[in-house]
Amino acid sequence: MLTSLRKFTTKSLKNNRGQGATEYILLVAVVVGIVMMFGPKIKEKLSATTEKLGTSIDTSVEQSVK
């Protein structure tokens, strides 16, 4: 009886099915949380950077046409 209990316990501890899915769910939850926290700041910076880039391109094109 004790041997079968030991085997069952050992087998149960070694069974890690579903562990990978749980880890992926936690990882996705963390990434979503980070995006929710920093998303507006990143969007603002990205918008400002693309605006500067557009202005720079326009200026360069206008100067090369002259």
Image (cartoon, rainbow, N blue to C red):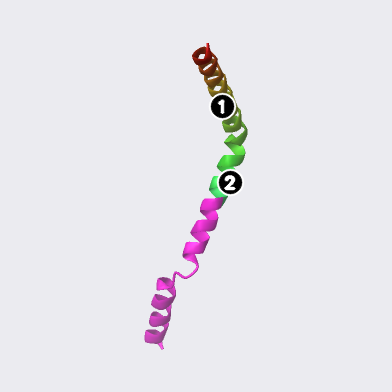
Above or below for 13 versus 24: below
Above or below for 15 versus 60: below
- Residue 31 disc label: none
Residue type pointed to by label 1: Thr
Above or below for 63 versus 20: above
Identity of the residue drawn at 59% across and 23% down = 51
Residue 3 spot, x, y in % from top left:
37, 85
Identity of the residue drawn at 56% across and 23% down = 54
Label 1 residue SS: helix
Foreground: 29 or 2?
29
Pointer 2 residue:
32
In the picture as drawn, the residue positioned furthest to the top comes out as 66
In the picture as drawn, the residue positioned furthest to the bottom comes out as 1
Q: Which residues are magenta?
A: 1-28
Label 2 residue SS: helix
Identity of the residue drawn at 56% across and 29% down = 46
Classify 10 Å Cα crowding around label 1: few (below 14), some (14-19), many (20 and above): few
Residue 1 spot, x, y in % from top left:
41, 89
Magenta: main secondary structure: helix
Residue type pointed to by label 2: Val
In the picture as drawn, the residue positioned furthest to the front comes out as 66
Above or below for 20 versus 62: below
Identity of the residue drawn at 51% across and 12% down = 63
Pointer 1 residue:
50
Foreground: 16 or 47?
47
Foreground: 58 or 46?
58
Mark 1 or mark 2: name the one nearer the start of the chain.
2
Foreground: 52 or 22?
52
